[in-house]
Image (cartoon, grey):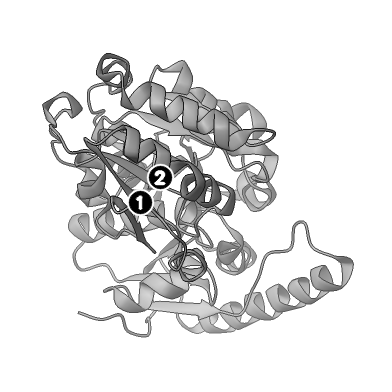
Amino acid sequence: MRATTPEFQDSLVLTGGGTGGHFFPAIALAEGAHVRWPDRPIAFVGARRGIEARELPQGPWPHLLLDVEGVVGRSPLRMARSAWKLWRAVGQLKTLWRRERPWAVIGTGGYGAAPALLAARSLGIPYFLHESNAAPGALVKLVAQQAQRVWCGMEAVQELLPGAPCRVVGTPVRAAFLRSFRPASSLSAPFRLLVLGGSGGARALNEALLELAPDLLEALPDWELLHQTGPAELERLQGRSRHPRHTLTAFIAQVDEAMEAASLVAGRSGASTCAELKAAGRSAILVPLPTSAANHQLRNAEAMAAEGRATVIQQGQDFTQRLADMLRGQMTDATLRQSLSKAPESNRAVALCLDDLTALRA
């Protein structure tokens, strides 16, 4: 079934996007809500750019995509243009929602969530937030105190949102991750290194892998590499010379299956990726995005390392060589890999959020 234009009356509205870290928790909550309340309309609101603009039209969820863009970190002229687009989008939603009033709004962050959350706050529509990262984004900080609840993926978020009604629940994962995963120790050759640069890709990580993979794979004939580059990066990289066992792909839709087949994962440390790694019980080498807001990816990675689930390497001088050394060390040491591949962690975040929503909307 393909997505349709939403009808918002008495609907549960999910909003969040730009990147997979904001979008996939919203999808997970929508999946859970549909199972729990099959007669409750569910709709998405997002931006015309970012991952939701690519994924929602291919899926089952009715949705409205608005012409908005990020504000933080832009030039004064672009900030003014972005603020005007946001003001216009909020006005459009307020006009629509005065006629078709949603039952509740859940925001999972990102600039695509701003119009729906600001419109809900203005109209007195109950809204809820989920903040997956260890450091809250600017939008969550702005609207947290008036939320019915702020569900937190990590303990550290609470102290950064004083006065907000916080509850720690973990980060929602999609239904595909709510199953049993075979242990990494049961995998046999050819072993797979899975590289995830995030839904939009990661140029520094992509460049490093294109440079180091030929020697690494030549030295380790029982390994192969599956490398998610991001759609824009794939076009740039696919003509480059690479090892025959180095496979490039723009995006991995069944990432649960890819993780289950991987003996080692390397990639960014967005909150969704970290939650999925825990659910799958896979070890990882995490490369935090250095420009992430409030350096939240570094905090996420450090939290994973503190739990003994990952090792962390930051970009900077000699990044490619340091990454090559770390990869070689773990790819040649099964004992080390398996020490970081903890038992899969049961994820109850969706159930906890929906239980809470039910109690507060009763």
- Amino acid type of disc 2? Pro
- Residue 185 spot, x, y in % from top left: 16, 24
Q: Secondary structure at mark 1?
A: loop
- List the residue tagged with mark 2: 214
Quarter of the rendering occupied by the N terminus: bottom left
Evaluate whether residue 154 shows in this view.
Answer: no
User: Which residue does the image show at 39% across and 55% down from the upper left?
Assistant: 228
Question: Which is nearer the eye, 80 or 322?
Answer: 322
Task: State which quadrant residue 61 falls in.
Answer: bottom left
Task: Tell me if residue 307 comes above or below residue 25 in the rendering.
Answer: above
Evaluate whether residue 19 shows in this view.
Answer: yes
Few, some or many residues within 10 Å of mark 2 (<14, 14–19, 20+): some
Task: Tell me if residue 176 comes above or below residue 86 in the rendering.
Answer: above
Labelled pair 2, 1 in contact (Cβ < 8 Å) = yes
- Residue 32 spot, x, y in % from top left: 25, 53
Question: Which is nearer the eye, 210 or 38?
Answer: 210
Few, some or many residues within 10 Å of mark 1 (<14, 14–19, 20+): some
- List the residue tagged with mark 1: 243
In the displayed structure, does residue 90 sit left or right of residue 209? right
- Residue 103 spot, x, y in % from top left: 40, 65
